[in-house]
Structures are given as structure tokens and as C-alpha cells.
Image (cartoon, helix red, strand yellow):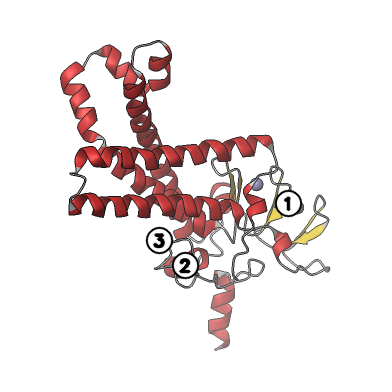
Amino acid sequence: MVPIFSWKRTVPRTMVNRFSVLVSACEILVEGLAIFVALPRVYPEASRSYWLNVLLGLFLFANTLGNFIMTIGVDSSSGSVHLPSILKPGWNYCHRCQKNSPPRSYHCNECGLCVLKRDHHCVFMGCCIGYANQRYYLMCIMHICILTIYANYLNMDLAVKCISENFNLLTLIASFTPVLAWIYGVTQPVSFFIAFQSITCLYCFLIFTVLFLYHLHIVLRGQTTHEFRRLDDRSYDLGWMQNIRDVLGTRWYLVWISPLITSPLPGDGVHFKSESLCLEEVKDL
Ligand SMILES: [Zn+2]
Ligand SMILES: [Zn+2]
């Protein structure tokens, strides 16, 4: 199955989801800015190290933003595939969509449609993560983790300088709440901007590292978040290598390079091989 991208889908249906997308896009821009503001301070501008780090920064920023856009724009709904009119065993009927819904597909009230192999509705992306866009979601949060580690590394000299030169309770509070510190006049606009981008990177690093490890663990077990949390159902676990292929596609080892690299998914999002089915096939042989 090849993912279908549409720019129309990048504007979510509800105002809450539109706001989530806007906040997340601003976060990514702040993280990217944190790198390019810090680079001339860390490396001499005409040096080879400077340009190598500019390339690294661009690579991480482009991958984060590209995978973010693809996660929202790729259609994971059941409307992207042809569904039979007869209700098959293991299928459900969705009264809201008035269509048959295949196994592992669930209706999302926020998105207003049935999502193939629905994993969860992501508050940061304002959309559902399902069969067709899970690859981009995983790569997006992985690149956010690396981007924030890198931005924190580049801004470390400022943090160390701040702690060693003017450390007191007020600067400590101002570092963790830069907006409040700026409003109450504790910090100047420039210090506010540096503190704001540093603290955004630190918060994002903590949140997205936990999120990435959690989702990677679930993917390796061949489950969706729903199957992991509510049912602990591992009937679709085909071994970690096949589970990775089912999410990242047949060229899974290349997807970290760019969201534009094609990596077709082995299935169709409607029919899934289960562990018991594979055992039956082996017996037949
Ligand atoms: Zn539905
Ligand atoms: Zn949704």
C-alpha cells in the first residue's frame, strides 16, 4: 500500500485540533531556531565544523517538519480503501460512517471517521495515528528527540555561563518559567528568548523521549496502543522484525533519511496476518 497525501488534510476538522497543530508547528520552529541561533556562537562561521553542523541542523529540522506534515496529511481512514458491503467475521459495522469496519479499525470522534489499524488520536498532531501514517509519526518523534538533544548541547555553554555567573533562586525560577519571568520584568527580551528556546527544547526532549520509547515498545510487540492498554492482545505479533516492516514498510532501514523516501507497506490495512494464521500455514506445508 502506498500512502495518499493531501494538503487539505493538514487542516484538522475541529478548532482544538487546529490549535494543537499550530502549537506543535511553533515548537518545531523554535527548536530549529535554537540550533541556528546557537551555531555561530559555538563554531567559527567560516569553518568546516560550522558548515557540517549547519547541514546536520538542516537535516534534523527538515526531517522533523517533513514527517510532521506527512503524519497529518497522509490518509489513514477507511475511506482510502475499498470495503466489502457484506459484514465478514471479525468485522464491525460503524453506525456513524454507515460502513463496515475491518479488524483493528476504530471510529474516532475527533476526526469523525473510521481509521485503519487505529493506534490513537495524537493531541500534538491533532489527528489519528493509524495504518498509513504511523511510519511518519514514529520518525517525527524520533527526530524531535535528536533535534532537542542537539539544540540543548549547542545551548549548554549559555546555561553553564548563567549558572556559574548569576546563580540565585530568581534566575533558577526564571529559567524554568521564562514567560512569567519576562512578563514580571525579571529577564530582558534577549535573555527571555534564549531561556524560552532552551526550556522548550528541554521540555520537548523529556516528553518526546518517553513517547518515542513507549511507541517503539508497542510497535516491536506488534500491537496498537489500544491493544496494548486495554486488551494486551498479541495475536498480531509476527516477531519484531516483521512488526517493524509492517509499520515502517519494506524499506524500513531507509525511512530515517527522509519522509520522501518510498517504503511501501506490506499489507492493505484491511487484512492482517495473525500468529495463529501463520502457524496454520506452517501446518499445511
Ligand atoms: Zn466510523
Ligand atoms: Zn482522531
Cα gap from disc 1 to disc 2, whole angstroms: 28 Å
**Residue bearing mark 2:** 261
Residue 199 is situated, as x and y percent measured from the top left of the image, at 36, 30
Quarter of the view holding residue 104: bottom right
State which quarter of the image contains the N terminus: bottom right
- Look at the image and tell me whether residue 15 can be seen: yes
- Residue 184, relative to residue 238: is it above or below? above
Classify residue 57 as left or right of residue 242: left
Disc 3 versus disc 2: nearer the observer: 2
Please tell me whether mark 2 sits on a helix, a strand or a loop: loop
**Residue bearing mark 1:** 113
Amino acid residing under circle 3: Trp
- Look at the image and tell me whether residue 223 can be seen: no
Please tell me whether mark 1 sits on a helix, a strand or a loop: strand
Query: What's the mark number on residue 256?
Result: 3
Mark 3 Cα shell of 10 Å, populated few (<14), some (14-19), many (≥20): some
Quarter of the view holding residue 253: bottom left
Amino acid residing under circle 1: Leu
- Residue 211, relative to residue 85: is it above or below? above
Disc 1 versus disc 2: nearer the observer: 2
